[in-house]
Amino acid sequence: MNTDDMLAALSRGEDETLRRLHARLADAAAADGLLDVAYRTIDSPVGRLLVAATERGLVRVAYVDQGSDAVLGELAERVSPRVLERPASLDTVARELDEYFGRVRTVFDLPLDLSLATGFRRNVITHLPDITYGSTATYADVARLVENPKAVRAVGTACATNPLPVVVPCHRVVRSDGTAGQYVGGAEAKRTLLDLEAAA
């Protein structure tokens, strides 16, 4: 083993030690009731996702490309500063997402914490699961669904700020001309999700 190999091995050992120490810290915080938001990252066909949950349920799904630090900062500011990475707390979320991307699951059974969505936006978010798997609705359709037919642009804003994309299916909302339109995870991610559901 040369010097570079030895340094790499030491670095891997340090990484493993830090990972184990962090896991112990997160477990101890959870056991003592000091962990309010647990998070992990998950690989998916639409990119790496950061998922976070409180005791009430899944509170955030974010595309890592959006900036993990910014997402964690938002959680610390708006939900609680007691945020730690604790993958085991989100095993069920990871399993259901895997099932969804594997075309095994069409509906999520996860408890949701909608504390990051308020007012009209929360009303829109609450109704998005009414658009069934494999189908789409226009922004105008959703505006009528929430009994505010003139609020088409506000529906678009609600979809763009959806704190739980993929799980709360804002990707099923499309333009009136049938084109996919904008999406928080990018146009390609939206097309991938629509194609995935259409192929089921």
Image (tube, helix red, strand yellow):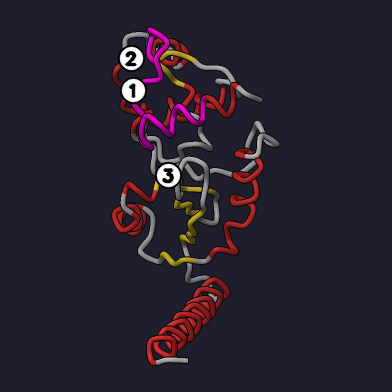
At label 1, counting other C-alpha atoms closer than 10 Å, the crowd grade (few under 14, some 14-19, many 20 or more) is many
Q: Residue flagged by tag 1: what amino acid is it?
A: Gly
Quickly name the residue at label 3. Answer: 115
Residue at 60% over, 39% down: 101
- Please provide percent x and percent y for residue 104: 70, 36
Q: Which residues are magenta?
A: 175-194
Residue at 51% over, 51% down: 43
Pick whichever of labels 1 and 3 is earlier in the sequence.
3
Looking at the figure, which quarter contains the C terminus?
Answer: top right
Foreground residue among 60 and 18 = 18
Kindly report the secondary structure that dominates the magenta region of the rendered protein: loop
Which type of secondary structure does the marked residue at label 1 adopt?
Answer: helix
Q: Residue flagged by tag 3: what amino acid is it?
A: Ser
Quickly name the residue at label 2. Answer: 152
Quickly name the residue at label 1. Answer: 156
How many numbered marks does the figure carry?
3
Compared to residue 140, the image places residue 33 above or below, namely below
Residue 137 falls inside the magenta stretch: no
Pick whichever of labels 2 and 3 is earlier in the sequence.
3
Q: Quadrant of residue 134?
A: top right
At label 3, counting other C-alpha atoms closer than 10 Å, the crowd grade (few under 14, some 14-19, many 20 or more) is few
Is the C-beta separation of discs 1 and 2 under 8 Å? Answer: yes
Can you tell which mark lies on residue 13?
none
